[in-house]
Image: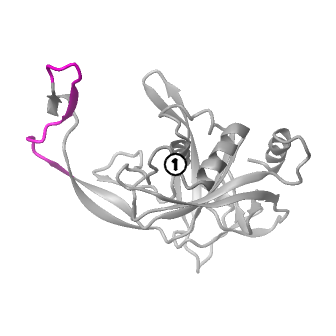
Amino acid sequence: MSQQSLSEWDKSRNSETVETPQCLSLTIRGPWGHFRRIEGNIVKQTYRIIPRTTVAGLLAAVLGIERDGYYDLFAPGNSAVAIEPVEPLRTVNMPVNTLSTAAESMKSLNSRGKISIKLPDPTKPRQQHNYEVLVDPAYRLYVWLSDSDQFDALHHTLSQGKSQYVPSLGLSEYLADIRYHGQFAVEDDPTTDVVAVDSAVPNAVDRVIPDTETRCQIEESPAFMQADGSGRTTTGFTSYAYNPDAGPVHVRDPDTNIVDGRTVMFV
């Protein structure tokens, strides 16, 4: 998201001219996290950087927006998100015993009553799956929304320390703690040389400068979704370069912004 579009949006939602646009900043963390990679594998692997689609779902939970009801709010041009890992990204493999949710393995409860539900049959054999799980993940998020009402609602809800639904880091049982930092100016970064970027670097992998003393990894994850007749469909992906040690990544001539003293890149 360019500085010009952010400025135009911020001016449009205020009667007076504003020198710089604004974004919201918060840190999410928890003891565990799992953002399932879409590639099939016996081991259920996780993305290291929280996907943009997961950020959208988490913030929609804070606002109380139902599933499949927030895709337009976080669509390209309607939103911008920067993601900064603030703790080293560590994983462990964790075996988990699960019950099948296939139709033949489900059991009806109160089948003769007015309300009937189906749950996995507890008498069926468990299946063991290995989950790759993030340990103590923490990310600082920088969020811009073109919808001024939802932007203000998100600011108000976060500043009150509230959330309409319980936020989680991927799986519902991996609860997330949210610390709201506030609303900050998004300042243009005029630097055109090599820049130390604090956030994950989206869609600029070819401009990352290798450093023998700094680790850098790359992954591609879902960024945008839209609702369809049967649920939802991924409509866009983002390639991130990031430092797994939660340090900066050096990038040549990036499109960066300064927020609260941090150098970040929005997507």
Residue at left offset 18%, top offset 43%: 99
Does residue 122 show up magenta in the picture? yes
In percent of width and height, residue 188 lies at: 83, 58
Q: Position of residue 197 (x, y in %)?
A: 68, 66
Number of numbered discs on residues: 1
| Residue 120, picture quadrant | top left
Name the chief secondary structure element in magenta.
loop
In this view, which residue lies farthest toward the left? 123
Residue 124 horizontal side relative to residue 219, left or right: left
Q: Quadrant of residue 47?
A: bottom left
Pinpoint residue 7: horizontal percent, then vertical percent: 84, 47
Q: Nearer the viewer, residue 225 or 164?
A: 164
**Type of amino acid at the residue the image marks with label 1:** Ser
- Position of residue 149 measured from the top left corner of the image (x, y, whole percent): 70, 38
Task: Identify the magenta region.
Answer: 111-128
Q: Please state if 99 lies on the left or on the right of 264 as rendered.
A: left
**Whether residue 26 is visible:** yes
Q: Which residue is mark 1?
A: 163
The residue sitting at the bottom extreme is 213
Please, is residue 8 above or below residue 167 in the view? above
129 within the magenta span: no
Residue sitting nearer the eye, 69 or 159? 159
Question: What colour scheme does the image use?
Answer: one colour
Residue 90, image quadrant: bottom left
Local secondary structure at mark 1: loop
Residue 230 shown left or right of residue 56 in the figure = left
Residue at left 59%, top 54%? Answer: 160
Residue 77 seen from this side: no
